[in-house]
Structures are given as structure tokens and as C-alpha cells.
């Protein structure tokens, strides 16, 4: 449980960091680039990476190398435009996408509870993004991109988990390297006349440590609860949503409309039904 608590705090602290810093386009990609530099450095020293096996499926790696830095940027924009609460909800409810893909792409059977959870989840997303008397909202666009981005990334990671020839840890290390390279490319594109500030570099280092710890301790939790993966998932998702809501409300004065609150309740209910479905009761 200690591993999960650390992972939850690190996940929410990533949002707090973006909320406090409010970086511009160049600063965002500089922080993201340094973040991946730290991530693949730490993973190399802690995971005992074996690079002798070169039979790598690049069709799984390359999309993630592009998607992960992009979604990190969308996460930053969403946090600063829509707040930590809504952004974390959109990120966590993105579970709907890999759950849907599990039976459409991977041939997994779907129960009534799981169907009900998926439908509730989509309704929850609509309610959380809904703004009264506002037809269009750039804020909602970033929430949608976070929702889609994290969901698609989860599908790719699910496919990587099916690979038997190369350990998941090795894939993760190579993905971090690829993300570092693609982040540098994004950084050069948006650089223009911006100057690198020591403060931004420092924030990038902090971001890298938090992001790595989030993933590292989450993986350790799965090892500890190897026979109860649904327990890890439930504690992680409920924990992040609850903590992000408290932090957003108490420290950033974020408000939720009735529709948003209803969406939050439906999101939690959707995750509950999806988790219950794992036990194949109905």
C-alpha cells in the first residue's frame, strides 16, 4: 500500500507543478524534455536493462514516442485552463478506451457490468466537459485530448504487455529514450528566440523525478499485489481523483458545477462497475 500512496501523491504533484509554474509553449517542452532525460536515466540505473535482445516491435514504440510528449503538453494546457480536478478526472476516466479496446481488438469477453460502466463513463465525460451557455470551449478541447491521449497510450501499453520476447521494463526504457529525442525535436521547433532559464530546468528535473516515481512505485505495487491487479487499479484511480479534488478545491479555489459534480459521481460509479465486472459476476 505504501507504494501506491507514493504513486498517487507523485501523480497529483505533477499536476500541481504545472498549475504553479504555468509554463509557455517553449518552457513546457523544455520541462518535458528534461523530464524524459531523467526518466530514462533513472530507469537504466534502477531496472537493470538488458539491451542484448534487439527483436523490438517498433510499431508499438514509435506511436508512444510521439504521443507521450504530446499528451504531457496537453495535460499542462488542460490543467491551466480547466484545473487539476477536471484534468485528473479526464485522465483517469480514459480507462474507458483500453477497456473498450480489450474486447474490440484483443477478443476479451465483455459482461453486462462492464458495458454499463463504459456507457456511464462516456456520459460522465460529457457532463464533466459541459459548460452552460457556452457552445465552444478551448478548455474542453484540451480535456478531450487528455482523455483520448491517455486512453490510446494505455492501449499501446496493453499491447506491449502481451510481448514475451522483450521484458516490459526494456520497452519502457527505450520508450523513454525515444520520448526524449522527440521532445528535443518539438523543443527545437518552438524554440524561436526563447532563452533557457535555470528555473525552468529545475522544474524539469522535479517533473522528471515525480513522473518516474509515479511509474516506478505503481509498477512495484503491481508486483506486491500481483494476484490482485484490480485492487491496485481501484486504489490508484480513486486515490488520484480524491486527492486531486481536495488539492484543487483547497489550494486553487477550483469550482465544480452541478453537472461537473454529477459527472464526477458517474465517473466513480463507472470505474466501480468496470472493476466489479473483473470478477465476472454478471
Image (tube, rainbow, N blue to C red):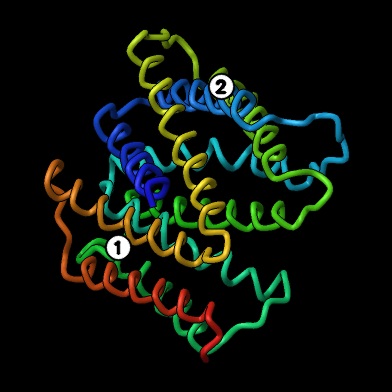
Q: Which residue is mark 1?
A: 135
Residue 282 image offset from top left, x and y in percent = 52, 91
- Distance from disc 2 to disc 1, alpha carbons, whole Å, reads 40 Å
Q: Is residue 95 left or right of residue 132?
A: right
Q: Which mark is residue 151?
A: none
Who comes first in sequence, dot 2 or dot 1? 2
Residue 88 image offset from top left, x and y in percent = 35, 52
Q: Is residue 54 left or right of residue 160?
A: right
Q: Is residue 168 above or below residue 27?
A: below
The local secondary structure at tag 2 comes to: helix
Residue 166 image offset from top left, x and y in percent = 79, 44
Local crowd size for mark 2, using a 10 Å CA cut-off: few (<14), some (14–19), many (≥20): many
Q: Residue at x 41, y 28 (%)?
A: 207
Q: Residue at x 48, y 25 (%)?
A: 29
Q: How many marks?
A: 2
Q: Which residue is mark 2?
A: 37
Q: Residue at x 28, y 47 (%)?
A: 84
Residue 65 image offset from top left, x and y in percent = 65, 37
Q: Is residue 34 above or below residue 242?
A: above
Q: Is residue 71 left or right of residue 109?
A: left
Find residue 271 and report its image quarter. Answer: bottom left
The local secondary structure at tag 1 comes to: loop
Along the line of sight, which residue is nearer the eye, 119 or 207? Answer: 207
- Mark 2 or 1: the one toward you: 2
Q: Residue at x 54, y 77 (%)?
A: 278
Q: Is residue 245 above or below residue 273?
A: above
Amino acid at each position: 500500500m505504501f507504494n501506491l500512496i507514493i504513486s498517487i501523491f507523485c501523480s497529483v504533484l505533477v499536476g500541481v507543478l504545472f498549475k504553479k509554474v504555468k509554463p509557455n509553449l517553449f518552457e513546457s517542452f523544455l520541462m518535458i524534455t528534461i523530464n524524459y532525460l531523467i526518466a530514462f536515466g533513472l530507469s537504466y540505473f534502477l531496472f537493470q536493462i538488458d539491451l542484448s535482445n534487439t527483436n523490438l516491435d517498433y510499431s508499438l514504440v514509435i506511436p508512444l514516442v510521439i504521443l507521450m510528449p504530446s499528451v504531457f503538453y496537453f495535460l499542462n494546457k488542460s490543467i491551466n485552463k480547466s484545473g487539476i480536478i477536471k484534468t485528473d478526472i479526464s485522465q483517469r476516466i480514459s480507462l474507458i478506451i483500453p477497456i473498450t479496446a480489450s474486447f474490440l481488438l484483443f477478443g476479451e469477453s465483455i459482461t453486462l457490468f462492464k458495458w454499463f460502466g463504459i456507457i456511464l463513463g462516456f456520459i460522465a465525460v460529457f457532463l464533466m466537459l459541459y459548460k452552460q451557455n457556452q457552445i465552444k470551449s478551448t478548455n474542453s478541447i484540451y480535456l478531450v485530448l487528455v482523455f483520448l491521449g491517455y486512453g490510446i497510450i494505455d492501449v499501446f501499453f496493453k499491447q506491449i504487455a502481451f510481448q514475451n520476447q522483450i521484458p516490459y521494463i526494456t520497452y519502457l526504457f527505450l520508450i523513454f529514450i525515444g520520448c526524449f529525442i522527440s521532445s528535443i525535436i518539438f523543443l527545437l521547433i518552438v524554440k524561436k528566440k526563447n532563452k533557457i532559464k535555470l528555473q525552468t530546468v529545475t522544474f524539469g528535473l522535479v517533473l522528471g523525478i515525480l513522473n518516474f516515481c509515479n511509474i516506478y512505485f505503481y509498477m512495484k505495487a503491481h508486483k506486491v499485489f500481483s494476484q490482485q491487479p484490480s485492487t491496485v487499479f481501484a486504489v490508484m484511480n480513486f486515490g488520484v481523483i480524491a486527492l486531486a479534488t481536495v488539492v484543487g478545491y483547497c489550494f486553487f479555489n477550483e469550482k465544480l458545477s452541478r453537472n461537473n459534480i454529477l459527472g464526477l459521481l458517474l465517473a466513480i460509479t463507472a470505474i466501480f462497475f468496470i472493476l466489479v465486472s473483473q470478477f465476472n459476476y454478471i
